Image (tube, rainbow, N blue to C red):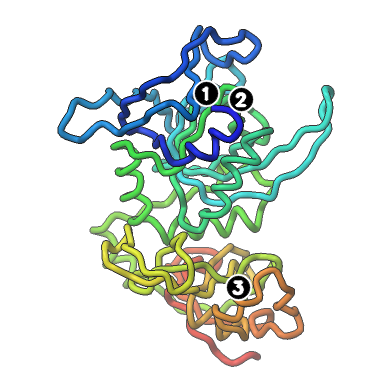
Amino acid sequence: MFGNDIDSREDSLQMFRSYYIINAYVKLLDPKYKTESHEYQWIINAKTIIEEIPENEQQVEMPKYNLIPINELDAYKDSIAEIDLLAVALHIKPPKEITLTNGPATLQEIYVIDQSFNPISLTMWGRFVQDECKKISEIIETKPILLATKLKVRSYNGLSLSSRPASAFTINPVIPEAKLLQRWIAINDSRLEVIIAKSLKYPSTSLSSVGIRQITKNCDVAALLKSLQPMEAKINIINLDQIFFYMSCINCNKGTGHDHDESFLCYHCKHQSVAEPRCRAYVEVDDGTGKLAAVIFGELAEQALGHSAIDFMNHTGEKLMNPKNLNLLSMFVSFWRTSGFKGPSSSPAHQKRVPNP
């Protein structure tokens, strides 16, 4: 598609759906525009008729992907191989300009994760920054699923991924593997929030080693609760430029891409809901023996920050937070930790405020 046909046909074709396409012009593909081995191209213009194939008729077979889990990427490091990946986008950095040997370039980093709990940096280059990265940044709070094809695996900063000119990206693809990953997100949302906090606190650290290694089995939870001991720690805000709220479902508090007061069907709790802002702060917990990244939510975060989630939403982009006004910077809290564990708990679920010393 070219020119005005791009805007007029913007919603005509959707990924993984089948269509009847009539009056498309077929011609040889100019070699200088080749990114695949195809020899021909279809050109869709104003005369082209596009109709979706009814569900009761035979559909076009969906493409097959050779999806590589993050914990198996090391085998492809610095090779000529190009891999396919299905992962969750957790955090996105601002775009930046750099100078290469062949001139200036634009890049943007996205932190992604899969069921291995090992986050990894994906560097997007050139046109992907203006298109896919922009769309992902608008819905990053919802933890969108990203289907990426033809990526390169690099040894930069431990292990990382990089887009190529022939790469392709689909946000929230409608494939069976994505549905399974969506269920995994819902089950492990609190763990993912902790990993997000670490990625914000250590932006220059290789994230392939940040993932949660210790997993507690359901049968061991009762014994774990009996071993909890009270402790006292101080929490601090390291990044005052973070966004102190996210739009959430009023039923389950999960993130959503809907606007304030907009009615929608939540795909987490499966109930009709309304979007409302919820306060959230990424903090550092210090008990004197060590420091850990943590996240505080809801009323506790509002009390500590001295502002409501509505305040933060209405003043987005303004310097609402002043270090002198933060109750949190010198606030001591009571945590629970397991016996034998060094350092504070990173879970905000058992926090209780006590008077400052």
Q: Which residue is mark 2?
A: 164
Q: Tell me the residue that label 3 is attached to.
A: 287
- Structural crowding at the residue carrying mark 1, measured as other residues with C-alpha within 10 Å and reported as few (<14), some (14–19) or many (≥20): some
Q: CA distance from mark 2 to mark 3?
A: 45 Å
Q: Using the image as rendered, state which of residue 99 and residue 232 is in the foreground.
A: 99
Badge 3 local density, few (<14 within 10 Å), some, or many (20+)?
many
**Direction from residue 302 to residue 63 in the image, left or right:** left
Please say if the residues under marks 2 and 3 sit with CB atoms less than 8 Å apart: no
Element under disc 3: loop
Question: In the image, which disc is placed on residue 150?
Answer: 1
Q: Amino acid at mark 2?
A: Arg
Of residues 112 and 261, the one nearer the viewer is 261
| Quadrant in the picture for residue 344 | bottom right
Residue found at x 60% / y 73% = 287
The image shows residue 295 at horizontal and vertical percentages of 53, 68
> Which residue does the image show at 52% across and 72% down from the upper left?
296
